[in-house]
């Protein structure tokens, strides 16, 4: 509809209606005040202008309200619920040993194999999860690890204290949350995910079933790349947000790592990154208050995405995939990162290239709101 046509419509119609009136009537009986037949031209103009203004307001004000809608992230009172740290770090996880669902050139080993090969190792100070960098010829896929927390979460504030992020050609590391048995119904949150050398910034992303859009007002410092979070669209690209180049990989490691914080609540999902040395005191003091941390790196508000119904029963997952549906793609492996030969050929015969392919964590802490 073209609203600008309305004044003409109104002004043309009224005289036509008037002229169909018998002459005598007007003299004998003045129409009631609300009948436009009795109005002066000036009154008609005022009335039609007013009508236009009301129609425009009725259309534009709701559009404006929807575009500016933003959830109220009122401060919640968080209490420490789970701590993953120290020598028992990996006891709180199960080891995923199925074939890689994302078709990587990888063998996810069980707990005793991982311990034997020292692919998972936990001490008082840190927990390490790495790709096998010793087997010279890994023809059917290189050994790696994927662990999934026994505890599951519908909401919470997650503090991931990270010392080292894995990087290198062919790697596809991720620290994420999902319910692998009910994907994508129960959602997926990628807190850290990159491929290969990982020097283009970390991607924070969510993946859902249909009905989750981020084409809304957001408050974040990262760069959004896709806005439809439905995993059935865009080749399951998710609706990611990219951090700066110090948010992952060698650049992040060289600065001493840092803390990634993820808040999952009905109002929305937000993630922050604090490089080592800039971690807020309330985090260190185990009394975290996101309302004091400033603008998030990534913000997924509940405006056009019912967060509570899309995200449930999530485990914390840490893994390092190799090649597969993401890292092995030509656009990443060749074009973006200029990695050698073919991805799986490289993985099979270059163990030395995986010495930096390890996660090292100080701790994970999960807070619940009461
Ligand atoms: C958090 O605790 C403070 C102090 O006890 C209280 O005033 C506030 O209402 C609480 N907030 C919520 C969201 O429960
Ligand atoms: C296992 O890995 C850890 C962490 O990198 C290292 O400190 C330790 O010496 C390794 N243990 C063996 C037996 O190689
Ligand atoms: C929650 O996830 C676990 C796996 O971590 C699964 O075994 C369980 O069936 C799920 N529960 C529900 C209610 O979906």
Image (spheres, rainbow, N blue to C red):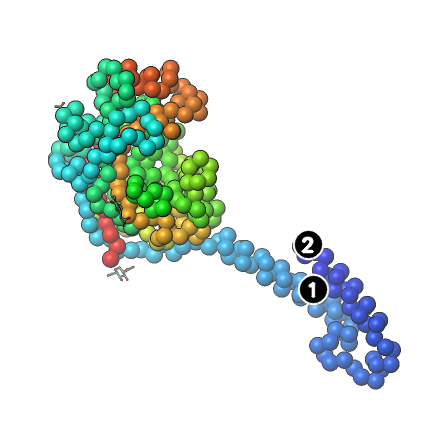
Q: Residue at x 17, y 32 (%)?
A: 111
At a point 24% along the width and 52% down the height, the residue shown is 368
Measure the C-alpha gap from mark 2 to mark 1: 15 Å
State the residue lying farthest toward the bottom: 28
Mark 2 residue CB less than 8 A from any atom of ligand 1: no
Report crowding for label 1: few under 14, some 14 to 19, many 20 or more residues within 10 A (C-alpha).
some
* Residue 190 x, y percent position in the rendering: 34, 39
| Residue 274 x/y as whole percent | 30, 39
State which quarter of the image contains the N terminus. Answer: bottom right
Q: Nearer the viewer, residue 10 or 149?
A: 149
Front-most of residues 325 and 46: 325
**230 sits to left or right of 247:** right
Kindly identify which residue carries mark 2.
2
In this view, 355 is above or below 217: above
Rendered view: 296 above or below 333:
below
Residue at image point 44% right, 35% down:
235
Give the mark nearer the N terminus: 2 vs 1: 2
Say if residue 284 shows up in the picture.
no
Residue 256 position in % (x across, y down): 25, 31
Q: Secondary structure at mark 1?
A: helix
- Residue hosting label 1: 49
Badge 2 marks a residue whose secondary structure is loop
Question: Up-down: is 223 above or below 266?
Answer: above
Q: Quarter of the image containing the C terminus?
A: bottom left
Disc on res. 186:
none
Whether residue 127 can be seen here: yes
Res 43 quadrant in image: bottom right
Local crowd size for mark 2, using a 10 Å CA cut-off: few (<14), some (14–19), many (≥20): few
Q: Residue furthest right?
A: 23
């Amino acid at each position: 509809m073209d609203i600008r046509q309305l004044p003409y419509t109104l002004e043309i119609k009224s005289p036509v209606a008037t002229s169909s009136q018998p002459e005598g009537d007007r003299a004998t009986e003045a129409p009631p005040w609300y009948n436009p037949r009795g109005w002066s031209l000036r009154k008609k103009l005022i009335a039609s202008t007013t009508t236009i203004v009301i129609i425009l307001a009725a259309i534009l004000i709701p559009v404006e309200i929807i575009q500016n809608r933003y959830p109220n992230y009122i401060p919640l009172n968080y209490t420490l619920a789970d701590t993953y740290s120290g020598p028992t770090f990996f006891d709180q996880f199960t080891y995923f040993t199925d074939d890689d669902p994302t078709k990587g050139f990888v063998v996810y080993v069980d707990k005793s194999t991982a311990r034997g090969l020292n692919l998972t190792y936990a001490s008082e100070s840190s927990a390490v999860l790495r790709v096998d960098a010793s087997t010279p010829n890994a023809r059917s896929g290189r050994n790696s690890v994927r662990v999934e927390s026994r505890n599951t979460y519908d909401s919470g504030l997650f503090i991931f204290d990270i010392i080292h992020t894995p990087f290198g050609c062919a790697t596809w590391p991720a620290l994420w949350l999902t319910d692998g048995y009910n994907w994508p119904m129960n959602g997926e949150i990628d807190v850290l995910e990159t491929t290969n050398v990982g020097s283009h910034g970390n991607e924070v992303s969510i993946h859902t079933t249909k009905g989750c859009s981020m084409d809304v007002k957001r408050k974040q410092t990262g760069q959004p790349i896709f806005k439809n979070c439905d995993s059935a669209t865009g080749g399951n690209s998710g609706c990611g947000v990219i951090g700066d180049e110090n948010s992952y990989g060698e650049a992040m490691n060289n600065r001493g790592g840092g803390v990634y914080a993820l808040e999952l609540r009905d109002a929305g999902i937000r993630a922050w990154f604090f490089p080592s040395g800039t971690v807020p005191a309330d985090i260190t003091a185990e009394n975290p208050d996101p309302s004091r941390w400033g603008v998030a790196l990534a913000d997924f508000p509940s405006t056009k995405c019912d967060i509570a119904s899309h995200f449930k029963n999530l485990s914390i997952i840490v893994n390092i995939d190799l090649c597969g549906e993401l890292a092995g793609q030509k656009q990443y492996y060749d074009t973006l990162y200029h990695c050698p030969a073919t991805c799986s050929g490289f993985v099979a015969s270059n163990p030395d290239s995986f010495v930096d392919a390890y996660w090292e964590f100080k701790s994970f802490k999960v807070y619940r709101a009461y």
